[in-house]
Image (tube, helix red, strand yellow):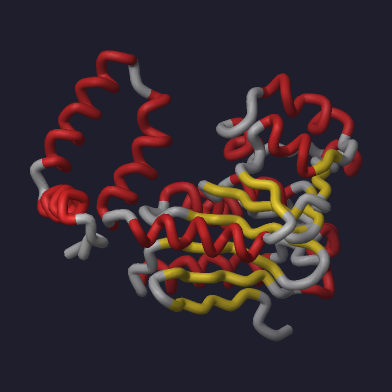
């Protein structure tokens, strides 16, 4: 079987494309392995952001059920866990660009990205219960975005829901009729910021909610003081004063 995932790096943006159209970009072992390698490539190239997009009418159909049923033994979900963890933990912002249907494990992959841009026609479904399993590992990124009560019906019934509902519950961040244009604007915004400032902002978005209030203030005060004293802030404030675009070191 040919290449299922490809990566292109241009202007500081790594674009990773899922292209396994014969099975609607299902999460086969090959696709997951190639996706992990593409993230490696993006990090090695020191990309400023990673965009995860797809070819074909579906972003991702979830687990490759044909591969799972032919495996003969318990499936190893650790590669999928590692990919989701890496999308969540990489220093650079990750953006899912979704122009087709998302099902089951594909929702977990999408939800692992920091920003999720979705065409207004896209539908979603957490169909695991209908094949006798649960949305187990993907519940980790999903429930970090969505309060349990707001997604309980979708997880318990497998019924599809639309982009407007996904946005309302917090599963996705943007609904648009121009996914490439919205993604490009977000990438431009990331590139306009200082590289370290963007990295630290990604970290604090996940870190602060896990901390006690006073611990959070103490840790974030220390970070703020450090950043204000660093060269990036000096350049940023000088550029603001001089009404010019900053030049980041």
Residue at the limit of the structure toward the front, as seen here: 243
Residue sitting nearer the eye, 106 or 56: 56
Residue at the limit of the structure toward the bottom, as seen here: 2
How many callouts does the rendering have? 0
Q: Residue at x 37, y 32 (%)?
A: 207
Asked if residue 71 can be seen in this view, the reply is: no
Q: Residue at x 21, y 65 (%)?
A: 247
In this picture, residue 25 sits left or right of residue 184: right
Q: Residue 65 sits in which quadrant? A: bottom right
Q: Residue 95 sits in which quadrant? A: bottom right
Residue 236 in the image: x percent, y percent?
19, 52
Q: Residue at x 26, y 61 (%)?
A: 245
Asked if residue 222 can be seen in this view, the reply is: yes
Q: Is residue 67 above or below residue 168?
A: below
Q: Is residue 116 above or below residue 245?
A: above
Residue 234 in the image: x percent, y percent?
11, 50
In the rendered view of the protein, which quadrant contains the C terminus?
bottom left
Q: Is residue 75 above or below residue 8?
A: above
In this picture, residue 233 sits left or right of residue 92: left
Q: Residue at x 73, y 84 (%)?
A: 1
Residue 169 in the image: x percent, y percent?
69, 30
In this picture, residue 155 sits left or right of residue 9: right
């Amino acid at each position: 079987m040919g290449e299922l995932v490809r990566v292109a790096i241009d202007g500081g943006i790594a674009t990773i494309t899922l292209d396994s159209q014969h099975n609607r970009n299902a999460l086969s072992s090959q696709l997951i392995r190639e996706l992990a390698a593409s993230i490696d490539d993006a990090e090695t190239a020191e990309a400023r952001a990673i965009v995860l997009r797809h070819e074909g009418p579906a972003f991702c159909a979830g687990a490759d059920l044909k591969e799972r049923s032919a495996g003969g033994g318990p499936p190893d979900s650790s590669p999928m866990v590692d990919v989701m963890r890496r999308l969540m933990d990489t220093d650079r912002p990750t953006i899912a660009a979704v122009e087709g249907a998302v099902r089951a494990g594909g929702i977990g992959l999408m939800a692992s990205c920091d920003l999720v841009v979705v065409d207004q026609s896209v539908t979603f479904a957490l169909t695991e219960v209908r094949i006798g399993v649960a949305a187990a590992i993907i519940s980790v990124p999903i429930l970090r975005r969505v309060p349990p009560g707001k997604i309980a019906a979708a997880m318990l019934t497998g019924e599809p829901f639309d982009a407007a509902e996904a946005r309302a519950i917090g599963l996705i961040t943007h609904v648009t009729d121009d996914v490439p244009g919205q993604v490009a604007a977000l990438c431009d915004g990331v590139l306009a910021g200082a590289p370290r400032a963007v990295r630290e902002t990604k970290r604090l978005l996940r870190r602060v909610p896990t901390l006690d209030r006073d611990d959070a203030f103490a840790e974030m005060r220390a970070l703020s003081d450090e950043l204000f004293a660093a060269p990036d802030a000096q350049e940023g404030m000088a550029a603001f004063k001089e009404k010019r675009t900053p030049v980041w070191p």
